[in-house]
Image (spheres, rainbow, N blue to C red):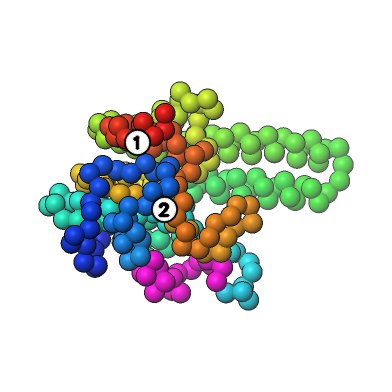
Amino acid sequence: MKNCFVAFQSNVEGIEIPNQLNNPFGKEVPVISQIATRELQAYIALNEKNWAHNFGFDDSVVQGVKGKMFGVLVVRNTSGKLGYLATFSGKLLNDDELGNFVPSVFNPAVDDFFINKGMSALTQISSEIKKLENQFGTTQKEDISALKLKRKNKSNQLQTQLFSNYYFTNLKGKTENLISIFANTPNKRPAAGTGECAAPKLLEYAIQNKFTPIALTEFWWGRSPKTVTRQHKSHYPACQNKCRHLLEYMLNDFDLFENALN
């Protein structure tokens, strides 16, 4: 497994260390998390110019702008050393080459790269639809409808297969995939993108490596999106629609977490 533990560069002697994990959906940002955040932000500022991602700081480039939520989890490793883990929500191009960021829990090579093959198949169907849409006639309309239904069914099947390969372990050592974890929720299934947010990725890595989670926070890096207000470098709670039930499952041993949400 990739070594993602980062030792503090700052002097953290005398800093109060929380005795239990803060509520990921609360507004509290523990001091030790603030220190880890400053170190990570300094690293991003130094290196982002070499990343193939447009965070929106260059006003002359308006295409492909996409800020990112980054996460920091302060931990103690198995030797008792204090440090932190860092990652981002979603994907960055060539993210395996960007440093010690915690990777996705999903392995794209599983089942002979089914996700890549499935996405290629969907792209092919979309191309066929577009080609027919440039033609006219009753036959074409019927064929287009059939292809759109085929694409929808294929997409749903691929999404279910994808969620079935996202596995998370909770603090009691129980491992389940996203389909199982969300089976008893009102929607019966996770929202698209569930499992790729920063908080669950960080906690999964900590649990797998037997690190002790101490303090968790997330912050926005980049230009604010049009759909929701996000300020550069500002801290934000974990999202509700993707992470609420997943984090409840993962952190069920934390009484403070449970009480804060109930």
Q: Is residue 36 magenta?
A: no
Give, as a three-letter code, the residue at label 2.
Glu
Q: Earlier in the sequence, mark 2 or mark 1?
A: 2
Position in image of residue 11 (x %, y %): 21, 66
Position in image of residue 16 (x %, y %): 23, 54
Task: Say which element carries label 2.
Answer: strand
View extreme (bottom): residue: 60
Q: Is residue 43 magenta?
A: yes
Q: Residues within 10 Å of mark 2 (few under 14, many from 20)?
A: many
View extreme (left): residue: 79
Which residue shows up at 37% across the image and 41% down it?
A: 23
Residue 59 appears in which quarter of the rendering?
Answer: bottom right
Foreground disc of the pair 2, 1? 1
Task: Say which element carries label 1.
Answer: helix
Asked if residue 125 is positioned above or below residue 87 in the image, the reply reads: above
Which residue shows up at 26% across the image and 35% down it?
A: 171
Whether residue 193 can be seen here:
yes
Whether residue 195 can be seen here:
no
Q: Identify the disc placed on residue 33.
A: none
Pointer 2 residue: 218
Give, as a three-letter code, the residue at label 1.
Phe
Answer left or right for 171 relative to 199. Answer: left
Pointer 1 residue: 257
Which residue shows up at 24% across the image and 67% down it?
A: 10
Magenta span covers which residues?
41-57
